[in-house]
Image (tube, rainbow, N blue to C red):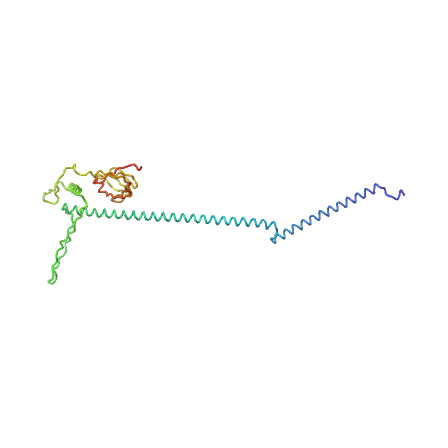
Amino acid sequence: TGSLCPPLKDTEDASETDLAKHDEDDYVEIKEQMYQDKLASLKRQLQQLQEGTLQEYQKRMKKLDQQYKERLRNADLFLQLESEQVERNYIKEKKAAVKEFDDKKVELKENLIAELEEKKKMIENEKLTMELTGDSMEVKPIMTRKLRRRPNDPVPIPDKRRKPLNYLLTEEQIIEDLRTLNKLKSPKRAVSPSTPEHVPSAPLENLSQRYEARIEEGKLYYDKRWYHKSQAIYLESKDNTKISCVISSVGTNEIWVRKTSDSTKMRIYLGQLQRGTFVIRRRSAS
């Protein structure tokens, strides 16, 4: 019997080998099953993603949609804010432009009126001076050809009307201007006391002081000094009154000054500055 039965040790070794082989086959089978399950899960998720039903995809899409709507809302608010700011700036600049236009229009009108009044005054003064001095430069009537009057025509009546003179200067200023004109005449010319050119002589000390005054490029040159717009000055008159003023504008033959006390405006002509009717002094702007 001992020869028919295999040894016990060999039988145990064979059993362990078969068991190990069986465990290995089971591990491989389990691993293959896990792989197949994972692959199937991925395929299922891919199918859901393509259909748009994947939970993770829907979650992220919802978050992205919220961010999109938030950015749109912020953009609308920013657009509204910028539009309101632009509208306010437009209204402000429009009002400033209209105000500047109105101010320039008023200033232009005042300057033109002052210039025309100055020219009118100069013409009237020249006419008055020629009539008082009997100057040969006075306008002579134009010689016209007289036609023979017909028997039935009415007799022409001469026009004896004469326009009255407007005396815009004081007697002292008229005498002063006449003396200046007489100085310009030739000294060899004899003047008869009976002629209109004769003016009683007076001491030179009684003449008003003459000042150099002219306007160039929008600035006033007076008594060896330059004066410009917005400059603070003192305005002195012959009655020793002293007014604090500011030059508001410089025209062609005159300047406009504004009193600092009540902001009223005055017009001063170059002739008044030259004759010393008004005297300008500088003062500090403060």
Quick check: 199 above or below 140?
above
Horizontal side of 71 relative to 252 (left or right) equals: right
Q: Is residue 193 left or right of residue 281?
A: left
Is residue 259 left or right of 71 when viewed as pictured?
left
> For the N terminus, which image quadrant?
top right
Specify the quadrant that holds the C terminus.
top left
- Could you say where residue 65 lies in the image, as x and y percent from the top left? 55, 50
Along the line of sight, the residue nearer the viewer: 174 or 224: 174
Residue extending farthest front:
262
239 above or below 164? above
Dividing the picture into quadrants, the one containing residue 276 is top left
Q: Nearer the viewer, residue 135 or 202?
A: 202
The residue most toward the bottom is 152
28 and 232: which one is in front?
Answer: 232
- How many numbered marks appear? 0
Q: Position of residue 228 (x, y in %)?
A: 29, 40
Percent across and percent down for residue 217 are: 28, 43
In the figure, is residue 158 to the left or right of 112?
Answer: left
In this rendering, the answer to whether 141 lies above or below 151 is above
Image location (x, y in percent) of residue 81: 45, 48
